[in-house]
Amino acid sequence: MKPRELVVILGGGRDSIGIIERVLEAGYSVFVVDQDPQCQARHLPVHIVEASCYDPNSALLGVLAACLGRFRRDGRRPSIRAILGGGTDAIEALANIGAFFGLVAPSQETARICSDKFETMMTLLKAGVRVPEFWKAREPGMDGPREKAIVFKPIHGRGARGVVRVRPGEQDWPALKIALAAADNAGVMGETWIDGIQLSSESIIQDGRILWTAFAERNYSRLDEFHPYVIEDGSDMPPAIPVFYELDYERLANEQLQLAINAIGLENGKLKGDLVWDGEHIWVIEVAPRLSGGSFCSELIPACWNVDFVGLALRIALGERILPGEIRPWLKAHICQRFAFPNSPTDHPSRGGWVMGMGQTREIARERAEGQLHV
């Protein structure tokens, strides 16, 4: 590996730090695309490309300008080897930069589908993926009161901004107004709330097939406290779901995720998923061809399963092959992640920092995490 070989990482906030550190550890130079020059990644030995990773053209021009600057300084053309999304929902920039430099990345068609939550759900539905009932929500939205809980979310939203829940018996309009305000005229979709165990998933994809998936049980124990906002308070890994032959949630989840991968046309890379297990079926709520935030991929998976997930994602992004038998997960420890909430949050970025407890059992891990929060 040559010292001037570069990896581009989209996003320099706290969700990106563990991902950036792993790439640096592998010996690569890093361009971090973030419009905030004071982003957390500035403390690392990286070059900050001051451009929005949510604007695909701005991100590409920023990377090209950074390459030109390095060429003028060193007299050599820098070699960009890979691009990764650093826990940011910047799929279009990922595809745009990947296509320009000939890197392993989602196709621009995959990015188009996955940058619109309604389009994603329509694509999954047509492919036979089990998804909740969903619809485009429009003003005035005075339907209700409803018998079942529903969720409103901006079609182009990220970080749970504007994601709100309407409980059974409540009117739609107060929650819908919040979602519409966060959507900036881009549109809002409604979705039936599925009762069950909420799951996060992270899959490594090669040649259009899942090599391995990690699952975590999302914690929504404070859902009523933060109502109407849908705020996740960390997660537990592995999920506490009994596995029976005919009700193997991991097998059933991978079946649904594979259908989703086929539907969006993802060949190589990563797939982040939000799922629900209702005790019999897996429901797919969202998917995105990127690394997850919240340190799920960079810290929780290695601590629980002893799998270098970001390292595997980097190898895929570099165009390397992962051979059968290379991924050998074993339960190293139970993990509990919980967030601190200095104020009442309205989205995931407004949560505080987080702690992680580890233990031989789920209960010990939870006690250790909660103990850190109360110190």
Image (spheres, rainbow, N blue to C red):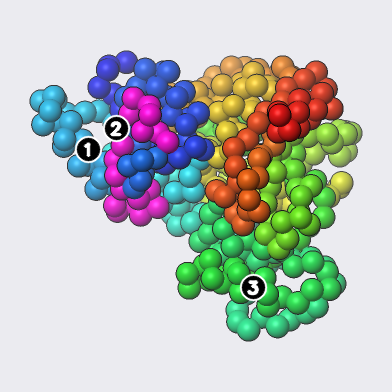
Q: Is residue 317 above or below residue 200?
A: above
Q: Amino acid at mark 3?
A: Leu
State the image quarter where residue 122 is shown: bottom right
Q: Secondary structure at mark 2?
A: strand
Q: Residue 65, position in %: x, y?
A: 20, 42
| Label 3–label 2 contact, CB within 8 A | no
Q: Amino acid at mark 1?
A: Ala
Q: Is residue 150 above or below residue 352?
A: below
Position of 170 with respect to 137 (left or right) is right
How many numbered marks have been drawn onto this rendered protein structure?
Answer: 3
Report which residue position mark 2 lands on. Answer: 47
Looking at the image, is mark 3 or mark 1 earlier in the sequence? 1
- Mark 2 and mark 1: Cα distance apart in space: 8 Å
Q: Is residue 48 magenta?
A: yes
Q: Is residue 147 magenta?
A: no
Q: Which residues are magenta?
A: 40-58
State the image quarter where residue 129 is shown: bottom right
User: From the image, which quarter does the C terminus lie in?
Assistant: top right
- Mark 3 and mark 1: Cα distance apart in space: 42 Å
Position of 75 with respect to 183 (left or right) is left
Report which residue position mark 3 lands on. Answer: 176
Q: Secondary structure at mark 1?
A: helix
Residue at left offset 29%, top offset 52%? 58
Residue at left offset 42%, top offset 18%? 25
| Label 2–label 1 contact, CB within 8 A | yes
Q: Amino acid at mark 2?
A: His
Report which residue position mark 1 lands on. Answer: 66
- In front: mark 2 or mark 1? 2
Q: Residue 360, position in %: x, y?
A: 80, 18
Res. 136 in view:
no
Q: Front-most of 224 and 250?
A: 224
Position of 136 with respect to 89 (left or right) is right
